[in-house]
Image (cartoon, rainbow, N blue to C red):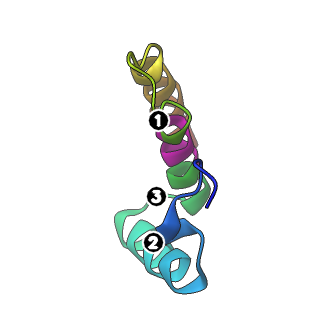
Amino acid sequence: MPRNVVVLLDNKDGRSMIKAACKESGLLFAEFEELVQAEVEQTGKQRRAGLWDSFDDILDRIQVDE
């Protein structure tokens, strides 16, 4: 399995479950995926430099979209 795959997002049932949770929370699934991808890109690194900045950028865009 590739290192950058989030198992829950890689199968139909998992995606459906997360989409439902996002809908309940008022979060777009695409935004959730973007947050997860920011974390996945840091997997295996000793320092996660820039992760909080990435989260801030994504979350700021979510606030603007609302």
- Work out whether mark 1 precedes mark 2 in sequence or the reverse, and give the earlier one: 2
Relative placement, left or right, of 50 versus 52 is right
Residue sitting at x 52%, y 81% = 16
**27 or 44, nearer to the observer:** 44
The percent coordinates of residue 29 (x first, y second) are 55, 62
What's the residue type where badge 2 is placed?
Ile
Relative placement, left or right, of 47 versus 64 is left
Which residue carries the number 2 mark? 18
Q: Secondary structure at mark 3?
A: loop
What's the residue type where badge 3 is placed?
Leu
Residue sitting at x 52%, y 86% = 13
Q: Secondary structure at mark 1?
A: loop
Q: Quote the CA–CA distance across marks 2 and 3.
A: 10 Å
Q: Quote the CA–CA distance across marks 1 and 2.
A: 21 Å
> Mark number for residue 43?
1
Label 3 packing within 10 angstroms: few (<14), some (14-19), many (20+): some
Label 1 packing within 10 angstroms: few (<14), some (14-19), many (20+): few
Q: Quote the CA–CA distance across marks 3 and 1.
A: 24 Å
Residue sitting at x 56%, y 53% = 33
